[in-house]
Image (cartoon, rainbow, N blue to C red):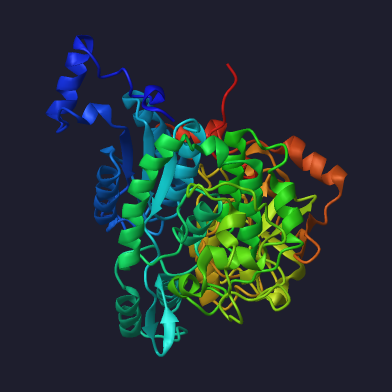
Amino acid sequence: MSPETWRTKGLYEGPRHAGTRALMKSGGLCDGDFDKPLIGVHNTYSEGGPGHIHLNVLTQEVRAGIYQAGGVPVEFGGPGHCPSLAPLEHDVPQRDIIAMSVENFVGLHVLDAVVCVGSCDKPNPAHWLAASRLRDIPVIMAEGGPAMAGWYGGKRLDSSGVLRAGLTYALDPAASKVSAEQVVEMENCASTGPGACALCGTANTTALLSEVLGLTLPQGGSIPAVSAARRWLSRQTGRRVVEMVREGLTPSSILTRESLENAIIALHALGGSSNAVYHILALSEDLGLGDTINIDLIEYWGKRIPCVANVMPSGMYSMPELDAAGGVRGVLKRVEEFIHKDAMTVSGRTWGELLKGVEIGDSDVIRTLDNPVFERGLAILKGNLATSAVVRYSVFPKSVRQFSGPAKAFSSQAEARSALKKGQIHRGDAIVVPYEGPRGGPGMPDLFHLMYELNGAGLSDYCPVITDGKFSGFAMGAFVCQVTPEGAVGGPIALVRTGDIIDVDVDRNILNVRVSDEEMAKRKSQWSRPKSKVERGYLTLWANYANPASKGGGLPYLPL
């Protein structure tokens, strides 16, 4: 791409643009800078969680790389949060808000390219969406990286283990295996410093998939946050984006049908977070690829690709250990026969080129296809209770992979948690929780508090939770989530009554309720949508317009 075709070319030249130059000079630019590409640097630094606390340091490295390569960085901020700390109805909407903020700033300032510096559950997929919408200018991601794992009692420990211990103790101190003092010891041991939590939760799943999609440089998804190599890669990312401007390499050549299918294959091989499903589907919808990159394709590959990554929460090892074993390239090497090796990446090389010479050997961290950690990564269930629902196979207990039992139907997570505390949920019950989906939540909130409390009560291996909401990438247990259609639009999940028999068969991809079509139709005729939980503010957009989880759970493009 020659300078004549840069977006900023002509915007700062001659007397007519003296006022514009004066504004930019007031911000620190000087003569000579206007002949260079202006590179946006979206920095989601915040003190709201460990995944974001170090991003200012990495952003400085990105800026240095841009200067070294002959560009001029234009930094701008954006929200970054830890979903473990947030009121959970605000979690998913932040993805779309971040994407819109990047799209908005770049549109207003007419930049030549963008580096997205981010970490954790929503900034990562938000930057996918931003790249989709800015598809004709170069976009590259600079990930924050995973935290180091802690150790407690001779075992690896991260914040998910502390969450389970703390909620278990809070539910019933007498039955807890750890004391209040030990919970504090555990939280201190798990506090290892900057980075996304050291397991393959949603933050690190989406970071790894950012690399698979081709949006980061090699190893971008897995180098530990505290490693010097993370700073080196950030600086290299700054240099690379300037090269991309000169080469004309943009997301339109990277975010393709093939790259998204690669991400789906990798998701199963990682046994990654169930939340990555709706993020991939949101990206697919944004790119206009929903006809083929859809829930059915995720189901297809779920029956064919086993989980080969032996990583917490379902496996033994931490994220830094996955990085040392080969990271994304190691995982893709294991499934090389299935992926599209001609898919392009921001490095300017295809996946076929990047995988040449990669050797994994006999690794317990990244297993072979004939010796997987689990037979499957994720599964999509269907039946008369859902056109689609998502199961993270790698954390789903074997004891209930084939389940039949009576429903305990609730209208919210809060109601279900209250019943659990009162001893009204028993082994063998199916806990059905509608009205937690994209519109009903609104915003598809997380039910991980319920799952952890079931764990503390000794019921998580015996009582499947079926909901149109979502579950944290930390969660372990029998959860069936993202049920579509959701309760708030009158989906069958809203029509289930206590005592109905629920059938779950994860291996056969089945989710049914033993109620006749005639009875369900009768119940539907008597159903009316409950009053919305919100009456003002931005969440009303989700309550009224959000796409179903099977299309990403975000705001749709509304017809004119």
Residue 175, given in percent of the width and then of the height, sits at: 47, 84
Image vertical order of residue 513 relative to residue 102, above or below: below
Residue at x-position 61% and y-position 36%: 285
Residue 197 seen from this side: yes
Q: Residue at x 37, y 73 (%)?
A: 148
Q: Nearer the viewer, residue 272 or 338?
A: 338
Residue at x-position 47% and y-position 56%: 207
Which sits in the foreground, 326 or 404? 326
The image shows residue 303 at horizontal and vertical percentages of 76, 61
Q: Is residue 516 above or below residue 271?
A: above
x and y, in percent, of residue 279 in the image: 55, 47
Quarter that holds the N terminus: top left
Q: Is residue 223 left or right of residue 494?
A: left
Counting every numbered tag in the picture gives 0
The image shows residue 316, relative to residue 75, as above or below, that is below
Q: Quadrant of residue 424?
A: bottom right
Dividing the picture into quadrants, the one containing residue 380 is bottom right
The residue lying furthest to the top in this view is 16
Q: Is residue 96 or residue 256 the one in the foreground?
A: 256
